[in-house]
Image (cartoon, helix red, strand yellow):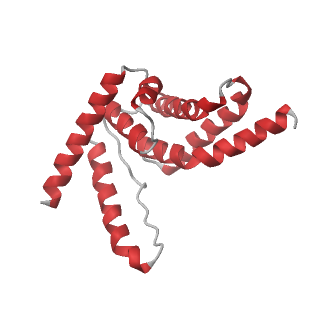
Amino acid sequence: MTKSAKNIVQFTISYNHYKDGVYNYILKMVGNRMVCDDLVQNVFLKLFENLDSITNKESIKFWIYTTARNEVYGHFRKKKVDLTKFVSDDSFDIEVISSENLEYQFELKEMKKIILKELEKVSIEQKEVFLLKEYGGFSYKEISAISNINEDLVKSRLYKTRQKLIDKISKLIA
């Protein structure tokens, strides 16, 4: 297999494996599907263009999410978006798998709305750490490297964000 064919196979595997997570991360950061689609496309275009330069193929996930983060922040800088005010306008969809799961799915959808609404009230730094951990599945060390901050700060931000969410949700449930 030629190097070009290997790259296409590697890209296809990486794209299929990470596209949903990257899409969810970016969508929750920017809150707009059209912008998200463009940014996701940019991330994977850059992956395709730079696949030869990634020496450790085990670090592709890290590379993809770091690029996704850079694309999001680049978008905010370009649009001069106030990073303290996020509005998720179209990120709530419900998919009915079966009528038996309808109630559960509705409750899950409502819980996601509450969580995302509360995430809009936290700082961009806390929101980013939470999304990378909960939606991206990254370790503290990986989030530290992606965000270019100390691992203890990652833990602190994640803890504070989770506490805020728990406090708000417990008030609504009680």
Please give left or right for residue 8 compared with residue 164 in the image.
right
- Relative vertical location of residue 62 with respect to residue 89 in this rendering, above or below: above
Count of residue discs: 0
In x, y percent, where is residue 8? 77, 40
- Relative vertical location of residue 80 with respect to residue 118 in this rendering, above or below: above
Q: Quadrant of residue 159?
A: top left
Please give left or right for residue 45 compared with residue 31 in the image.
right
In x, y percent, where is residue 5? 83, 39
Q: Quadrant of the N terminus?
A: top right
In x, y percent, where is residue 129? 37, 34
Q: Quadrant of the C terminus?
A: bottom left
Q: Can residue 125 be seen from the camera position used here?
A: yes
In x, y percent, where is residue 150? 36, 19
Out of 151 and 52, give the one closest to the viewer: 151
Q: Which residue corresponds to the image point at 54% horizontal and 50% vertical from the top-left?
A: 20
Q: Quadrant of residue 143?
A: top left
Please give left or right for residue 148 compared with residue 103 in the image.
right
Q: Can residue 35 be seen from the camera position used here?
A: no
Q: Which residue corresponds to the image point at 21% horizontal and 41% vertical from the top-left?
A: 163
Q: Which residue corresponds to the image point at 77% horizontal and 36% vertical from the top-left?
A: 7
